Structure formats: C-alpha cells, structure tokens
Image (spheres, coloured by chain):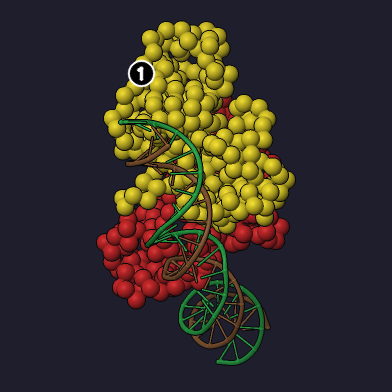
Chain colours: A yellow, B red, C green, D brown
Amino acid sequence: MKPSVVTIEPNGHFCNDCAVRGAAVCSSLDAAELREFEHLGRRVHFDAGETVFSEEDITTSFYNVLDGVMRLYKLLPDGRRQIVGFALPGDFLGMNISGRHNFSADAIGVVTVCQFAKAAFGRFIEDRPQLLRRINELAIRELGQARDHMVLLGRRSADEKVATFLLGWRERLVALKGLSDTVPLPMSRQDIADYLGLTIETVSRTFTKLERHGVIEIIHGGISLLDPARAEALAAA
Amino acid sequence: MKPSVVTIEPNGHFCNDCAVRGAAVCSSLDAAELREFEHLGRRVHFDAGETVFSEEDITTSFYNVLDGVMRLYKLLPDGRRQIVGFALPGDFLGMNISGRHNFSADAIGVVTVCQFAKAAFGRFIEDRPQLLRRINELAIRELGQARDHMVLLGRRSADEKVATFLLGWRERLVALKGLSDTVPLPMSRQDIADYLGLTIETVSRTFTKLERHGVIEIIHGGISLLDPARAEALAAA
DNA sequence: ATCCAAATTTGATCTGAGTCAATTGGCTTT
DNA sequence: AAAGCCAATTGACTCAGATCAAATTTGGAT
C-alpha cells in the first residue's frame, strides 16, 4: 500500500452538516456539547486502497466514518487475511485496550472520516457518562455481530455464507440509504472471500449459481436481489 | 437440558472471601462501594450440564463467574452449534443491547456465579463511571478476542486450530492458577470441535497426531504440553 | 466387580471447497 | 481501436476435513 496521502479540510464548525450527526457516537451529545465536540475532530479524506491505520500501530486517534466503505482485517504472518468487518458511515473505530489497534483498516473507494485525537477525546469523555454509555452500547452491539460472524465462519456452508452476506449487506445499506433491491458491492470478490472464509473462486461460483437459480442478477458493481425470500431460505438453511 | 435446579446461598457479606474480588468488574470498586455492591449480588450454584441462560431469554441478570467453566454458544435452527467462548472465573456475562442474551450459556461441571438483578445493577452503575469504564474495557477486550477467533475459524487449518486452542486455553489457566504444563480440559471433544469449527473426529485425530509427534501427551481429563515451542510453531504457521 | 451408556478413538470412504490453470470481460492508456 | 492489465469467471483436478461405521475406553450405577 502506498504511503497515506491525506487531505485535511480546514477545521471549523462542520458537525451541523455532518451526514452521521444523528447516528454514530454523536447522537448522545446535545447541541452545546456537539459544538465543543466538533473542535476535537477533523475531517480527513482517503483515496481508494489507502490504509487508514494498521494492526500494529499505536492508537493515536479514533475515527468516525462519514462517507465511503472500509475493510477491517487481520493478517496472518504468511499473508492469509481475514476481514473482520466492513465499516460504513456512522461506524466508530479505534476502541481498544492495549493502546494498539487490533486490526487494520483500508479505504475501499474514497473515504471520509472524522478523526479525533485520542487524548483530547479521552478528556472530553471523562465527565460525559452518556457518551461513554453510547460507546459501550456500540461495542456490545459489535460484539454481538462478531459472535454471529463466528457462527457463519465456523458452521455454515459456502452457499449459506454468500446468501447471508448478501442479505446482511443489503440490510445495512437499507438502514443507511433506504430500501432497494439493487445491492452495490463496492468491495472486490477477494474481499468477500476473505470476509466469509472462502476463496475467490468459490465466491464467484456461488454468485453464478445464485444467478442461474434466479435468486440474484449479477450487475456491474453489485447484484440485484431478484428473490429475497429464496435468499433468506438459503441463509437460514 | 433438565430444568435448572439452583441452590442459592444465604445472602450476606461475601465479597470479602470472593475468589475473583480483585479481578472481574469488582476491581473497579473501592472498599465502601464493594460493601454496597455485595447486597446486589447473590451466589448461585449450577450443576454440570445445566443451562444458566438461553439465547432467546430476556436479560434479567448479569453474571460474574466465581468458579467453574461455562460454554457460551449459539445454535442454528438445524442444530449445528458454534461455541463462541468459554467463561472462566472472573468473566462477566450478560451485557447486551436488545434486552436479550445473544448466546446461551451452560455449566461445564459445577459452576458458581455471582448473579445481579439487571435493574439494581443498572441503578448502581448509574453514578459510577469507573465501573462503566471497567465494563467497557471488558467488552472491548472480548471484541478483540472475538476478532482473533474469526481469523482462526475463517483462515486456519485443523492443526493450527487445535494447537492455538491448547496454547490459548493453557494461557488462561496460567493467568488464573499459575504456570503448569498439564492442561486440564474440562470440556468434551464435541465442545472443542464446536469451538474450533471442526468435527469431533478431526479434533480427536489431531490430538492423536500431536501426541504421536511428541508435542502433547493425552492424559486423563486433559493434556500435558510436552513441547510448547513446537506447539507455538504449529499455531503460528 | 459387572453391566450399561456415553465419550472417544480409529478406520474407510466421500465430498465441498480449494488449488491450479486458462479464459473472458472491463477499463485505461496510447 | 489495439494493447495491456487486472478482476472475475470457468473448468479440471485434488485434498483436507466431513461423514459413516466400528471398535475401544471411560464412568457410573448397581
């Protein structure tokens, strides 16, 4: 990955027009707090493929995804990769205990984040238990998703994995942008494979099979979900 | 699973002699707080195989494991099981958002927990941000472990899975009871298989293989780690 | 001790997904 | 529009781990 060339917008009052103002961690703050809060963060842009932070890095920042999609992953020494999640607008990244990130994060396509210095953020949170409670809530929700994903990785077949992924991804996009049966897939087949614990060939074959059976249509940059009910049936199995 | 027949000890001051007083969530409380805290909890015993709570249950309690081992798992509709973790003394269970547990928990062998009513615990935590911070810390640590386990489930071979499990389990016991090369395994082969995303036969064969190669010795109720270095090498691979 | 039931190990065989190897398709560059 | 490049698809074949099927060991209960 090439060195991260970031563009930092002029700092200032921008929470007002922030797309994820009502979501994310910010939803736990009132108007006055939000005004104070916005001085802590700065918008940072990343180009497609750029690494936002790496697993070994000391944590110096928290990130709130404002726009775009990121892949969150861990690598084994020999290069095998497991994607542990995809981050979308509203997702909060950077929580950890050891002071080091425990996964890496790349931009898939162009990404904008709201970046907070760890120290300043820590001071801000100090006397705002409702913000801490919000962060705790987010962590616990993620923990639940992580456990669901363990079931998928450990106990589901390739067909089930792919169907579950497509439905889950669609649901996240629905929550973000409203209902639609065309599901954009900004990530590569390799990314999907590394998320599902499969190879790129198996993902491709499974997509083709789902298309042959009339469950999906493979379109440019994504899929169209033709038969959601059948996809659900495959995912539940 | 037979209906849970629990024995509730006479309530009273018992934090003083609690084995996990310095660990768990309690470590964030001072002496005065601990005195107040102990009235919220009651010790409850479970027999081997009893279910402490189920995935669908409404959360009414939090649990602090005091003694014994529990398996935490999720079931698919068709009966496939994924164990998402084993709980040991000091582990805190019951955090969730939806108001429902998102996994089930069985006692492996006899278990003692410190059970807290959700409402009372919620009130107690209200004005104790350091307790909330401690719980957040525990959640984030678990999240990191969950991600590590995703890598294992999605990207590691059977040999690597088993070696990693044995080393990780040993490490937890070391932290709890001090160093020893004999590693008790209170859970069944089926439990290990469901934790690692394997079948019971593969686990058994891998144990045998490790024994043949002089890495471990299979002893009654556990294993003896003969060659930790070689086990590490297998786990890292 | 002796019997029974369950857990574990071992063996033989099968198969879902991986590996290896071409193609194909889409985009960019020239 | 031709060339080059990378991502995705498709095909042929392999193999790690699953499945099916016995032993064998272990642990209680009597």
- The local secondary structure at tag 1 comes to strand
The residue positioned 38% from the left and 58% from the top of the image is B164
Chain letter for the residue marked with disc 1 in the picture? A
Q: Say above or below: A38 vs C15.
A: above
* Residue named by callout 1: A7
| Horizontal arrangement in the rendering, residue A79 relative to residue B142 (left or right) | left
Of residue A203 and residue B54, the one placed in the foreground of this image is A203
| Horizontal arrangement in the rendering, residue A237 relative to residue A187 (left or right) | right
Of residue A210 and residue A128, the one placed in the foreground of this image is A210
The residue positioned 45% from the left and 46% from the top of the image is A190
Q: Is residue B192 visible?
A: yes
Quarter in which the C terminus of chain A is drawn: bottom right
The residue positioned 31% from the left and 50% from the top of the image is A77
The residue positioned 44% from the left and 23% from the top of the image is A113
Quarter in which the N terminus of chain A is drawn: top left
Q: Position of residue B8 (x, y in %)?
A: 64, 50
Of residue A115 and residue A189, the one placed in the foreground of this image is A189
Mark 1, residues whose alpha carbon is within 10 Å: few (<14), some, or many (≥20)?
A: few
Q: Is residue A141 visible?
A: no
What amino acid is labelled 1 in the image? Answer: Thr
Q: Position of residue B202 (x, y in %)?
A: 48, 69
Q: Say above or below: B73 vs A217.
A: below
Q: Position of residue A202 (x, y in %)?
A: 51, 55
Q: Position of residue B76 (x, y in %)?
A: 64, 54
Q: How many marks?
A: 1
Residue at the limit of the structure toward the left, as seen here: B229
